[in-house]
Amino acid sequence: MNNNIGIYVHIPFCISKCAYCDFNSYSGKSHLQHDYINALLKEIKYSSKSCHRNIDTIYIGGGTPSTLFEGAIQTIVSEIKKHYIVLDNAEISMEANPNSITLIKALQWRDAGVNRVSVGLQTTRKSALSAIGRVHTKADYINAMKILHDAGFNNINTDLMIGLPKQKSSDVRYAVSLANKMGSTHISCYSLILEEGTRLYNDVQEGRIKLPKEAKVLGMYNTAFNYLSKYGYNRYEVSNFAYSGYECQHNLNCWDMHEYLGFGAGAHGYIDNMRYNNLSGIEEYINAIYNSQDAREDKYICSKEDTYEEAVMLGLRKTDGVDIGMLTKLLEVDFYTKYKDVINRYKSLDMIEIVNDRLRVTDKGMFVLNQIILDFVV
């Protein structure tokens, strides 16, 4: 068993809630930040008593971690290092929005040991930003990237989205070119997922906003893929592109089914073959930690069937695919025999390939990835 594990820290605070967002995040609750951080520190300390594994990645996500008060990120990382063995070469990432990055905060993040920042640009088109409820501008992004470079960061991701209202392929090309120009070593390019219950979902359902058709969204993805490939970014996962050596190690570990601890409201964890999630409400989380030192709302031991399905769903997202020997072990029957017809069909369509006993989805197959995954889990 790999003795290394990761840590995920969830920060649920946002300046405003984006129209498409279905993550555990809240606006208008910044007054709870200090109480929340105090509870978070208690959870980090308490959990360390039963965990004696080395930490190889720390990921601080949200919400918007960059909206925390000055010194908060330093406090969190310091507490983790106090109670866990964090490897010297550990990747320590955090998410940030362009309009909440200041030089003082950025220097504090570097001082804390943060060595990777993920900046949420999404798009540069003003009308699209407005439609999805983003409160930053292109100018904010440019300024934020300059600040991060001035603070000494050289591992910076830019998050982009495609399939947004009023978005065109030319917008996507401009956004990826700007991210490249501003020194992004990693670019994530996600398709918009319309989540039921979000403001954007209601706007689309009631006809106030229209989304681009699927063919146009595929064209946007092709635009991003072609540009990024031309400028030296390697696609290592369906939506993630990076210069060699700048792949997100925390995400790679998760896709490879490595274990991690989850801290904070709504955080998920995976440890000793058990998946769990914390209470999602900020106040409920704080109260649970202070009352019982444990905020876990749900936990379950993964069956071999659960683990097999997760291994397929996560592994096939990566361009290097998933180990067939591992799948056979989880299935307890020969993978090649069970899925012979599916394998032959997709191989004949040049949508999958098998290299060194690893099942991989080709560039062509990435366009129908969800269907391929489904055919290997039935």
Image: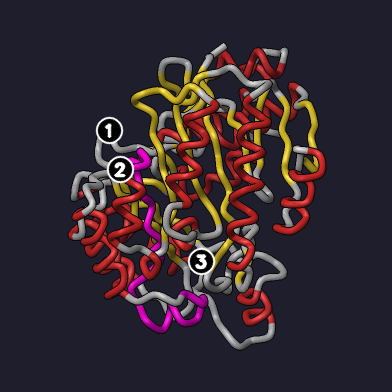
In the rendered structure, find residue 214 and report the number of the disc placed on it: 3
Q: Position of residue 373 (x, y in %)?
A: 60, 39
Check disc 3 and report its element: helix, strand or loop.
helix
Local packing at callout 3 (Cα closer than 10 Å; few below 14, some 14-19, many 20+) is few
Residue at mark 2: 242
Q: Is residue 110 above or below residue 133?
A: above
Quadrant in the picture for the N terminus: top right
Label 1 vs label 3, nearer the camera: 1
Q: How far apart are the alpha carbons under marks 1 and 3?
A: 33 Å
Residue at mark 1: 245
Q: Is residue 319 above or below residue 102?
A: above
Q: Image point 41% across, 63% down: which residue? A: 97
Q: Is residue 219 visible?
A: no
Q: How far apart are the alpha carbons under marks 2 and 3?
A: 25 Å
Give the total of numbered labels: 3
Q: Is residue 354 visible?
A: yes
In the drawing, does residue 62 fall left or right of residue 309?
left
Q: Quadrant of residue 223?
A: bottom left
In the drawing, does residue 181 fall left or right of residue 307?
left
Check disc 1 and report its element: helix, strand or loop.
loop
Check disc 2 and report its element: helix, strand or loop.
strand
Q: Quadrant of residue 345?
A: top right
Q: How far apart are the alpha carbons under marks 2 and 1?
A: 8 Å
For the record, the magenta segment spans 111-134
Tag 3: residue type? Glu
